[in-house]
Image (cartoon, helix red, strand yellow):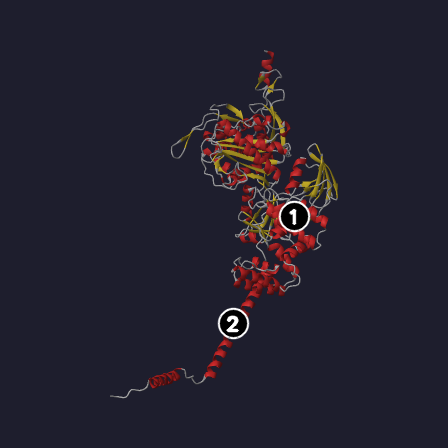
Amino acid sequence: MPRSRPKSAVRRGRAGKSSRSGARRIRRPTGGPARGRRWLAISLKLFLVATVIAAGYVIYVDATIRAQFEGKRWALPAHVYAQPLELYVGTRLDPKVLEDELRSLGYRHMRQPAAPGQFSHRADRFQIITRGFSFWDGQEPSRRITAVFGKGQLTHLKGDTQGLARLEPVRIGGIYPAHQEDRVLVRLEDVPPLLTNALVAVEDRSFYTHPGISTRGIARALWANLRAGAVVQGGSTLTQQLVKNYFLSSKRSLGRKAQEAIMALLLELHYSKEEILEAYLNEVHLGQDGSRAIHGFGLASHFYFAQPIEELRPSRLALLVGVVRGASYYNPRRHPERARQQRDRVLDILEAQGYLKPEAAAKARKEPLGITRRPPGDTTPYPAFMDLVRRQLQRDYQEEDLTTEGLRIFTTLDRRVQRAAERALARRTKKLEAAKKLPAGSLEGAVIVTARESGEVLAIVGGRQAQFAGFNRALDAVRPVGSLIKPAIYLSALASRRYTLASVLQDTPLHVKGPDGKVWSPRNYDHKTHGDVPLHMALAHSYNLATAHLGFSVGIRQVLSTLSRLGVERDIAAYPAVFLGAVNLTPFDVTQMYQTLAAEGFRTPLRAIREVSTAQGEPLARYPLAVEQVVAPADAYLITTALQEVVTSGTASGLNQRLPTNLRPAGKTGTTDRLRDSWFAGYTGDYLAVTWLGRDDNKPAGLSGAGGAMQVWADTMAPLSPRPLQPVQPPDIEYAWVDEQGHLSGPECDGARELPFQRGTVPEVHTVCSAKPGVAAGNVIDWFRDFFE
């Protein structure tokens, strides 16, 4: 039997075999140092590539920063302003209107004004220290003035005014970029030093010594983030905050923080501390107003206090600095107590660092927040007027220029007139609805008021809820105008020289067969005929039959030509119904037509813009007064005289009970079929206004021109104290007395009227009459025969 080996030998053998096999597995390969060198080379190359990439990135970021920071830093909205209030001796102005204007501009009422933006008011005397403002025609300096009122006008104006003082205009809206950012740029030298001192003391005490980042702040933030297990603190300097707001998103990550630090270092490398601080003042986010983001201290000052930044007291400056930490969290309108505590914390820091004396800090802590009840808002309170401004701007500017260049648009809006028109429409429509038992809110309207001579649009109301944007009826409601068209027919007749105001018209039935075989048979509003009537009376009483006869005599083509010359640009079909107002126009179209009549025959395109300037105050496009005489002065004078008769004794005679008798306005009522549309157009010595009432669903409103729109017109004019209408008599106009048959007469004759005539058109046929009523004859022989009999 075979001999067994000892176990130890077996173990040794296995072990030895295992050892040999293991030795083969762990044997070191040859060339170890060469492979190490190869890995070192690869690592070096990767490092060099990474360095190049990093350097390239830094160069790219550097170029980006410099390009954006040295170019147009912000997309600035266009700012739109109303007319500035001008003060001069003789200005017809209620003292209450002046005080309202001052408060709208953020002026503070003081016992004794001591700084710009302050005023006092005692009885009829104002003391005002105006703010300076850069107008399109030059810089208006700050002035200390005294204004004294008496009998509804400015009687004395004292101070360095040279006879005229001009307040800065009220901002009425803006045209914003797509991202809806808004800001009012400020310069570092113009802001109160306390603001910058507070900002640095609270947000970045080492601002003037660090290179863009603070190692101490980073270490503190890193420790806080490690303890929280997330990015909860940034340790940002003011420079880093500027970079984050200006160049980066609000996302929190270590990569974004590294990017922020690099950009901050580069920004400090190229720009001074003052430049960086000024950019921060204009960029920091300080609130939200709906879709509009409030950026910068300049706009925030207006947004929260309705005052420019340079006029803010320490308590208000401290509040703005406190809001920097969290515009939503410390929103003083939503969280007043939280905002107050933050304000006081800022005041404590200012006191501790010696920027405020203890007594001044204590006084500031006791003051209320001083926040205005409502923010100015990104939506204009005058949407219908702003609609017209936008349309007229788009003819001359690209949208990008309007939303990024910070243009300043000076408009023609008169806030006093606008307020009167808004109130008139809102109150009168409510009364008329109740009187006519119409559904609440169903009666709508529009009002346009212009300056009679210049064609400047002073007010536009696009609906009874004037402050809400929506369908702009003043510009876009195309409605039949009814009898408002008639002055164009009568003007055409007068211009032909075949007719005078004394010409006799036939107010008799009329039947006209059209191309389609249908017969057109117009009727008068009162369903009566009036036989022979003088031309001036036919217009004053708006007789349809007499007007239709006259229109056919003149010719529809001539009437359409007259409408075009007056400024009506819409295509109008040449149908007989045009004579009675079967023409669809907007209130704006009607206003343009009547503007030419009111301006004594000079056509002036209606305009809402006076001037446009850059953000720096340099004038750009000017909007000069464009005037073209399209109606002979004599003809314009005659038609205005006839329209004055509409008010004195015609369809608009109800105005005599609403307005001063010496006003003598010219006007015309308009009413459409089934009382769907109520119109009135009228002008005084200084204003032209067109009013319309109707329903959006085109159902009958039950209102005539005199019963509806004319009432709104009177309500608009009453608080404005308009001047009497006194048209200039042309040299080729002469007056003569005539009777109702259009014959020359005398003032003692029954029914005699003194009317104007263009020289050469005075009637030649005489009527001899006695002072005794009812005794008259066609000629002298008949008169003597009747006398002796």
Res. 439 visible in picture: yes
Residue 240 at x, y percent in the picture: 59, 60
Q: Nearer the viewer, residue 111 or 328?
A: 328
Q: Which mark is residue 113?
A: none
Residue 110 at x, y percent in the picture: 71, 41
Q: Quarter of the image for the C terminus: give it.
A: top right
Residue type at tag 1: Arg
First in residue order: circle 1 vs circle 2: 2
Q: Determine which residue is flagged by label 2.
A: 50
- Quadrant of the rendered image containing residue 573: top left
Res. 546 visible in picture: no
Q: Which mark is residue 316?
A: 1
Q: Nearer the viewer, residue 54 or 130?
A: 54
Q: Secondary structure at mark 1?
A: helix
Q: Name above or below for residue 191 compared with residue 472.
A: below
Residue type at tag 2: Ala
Q: Name above or below for residue 334 compared with residue 33.
A: above
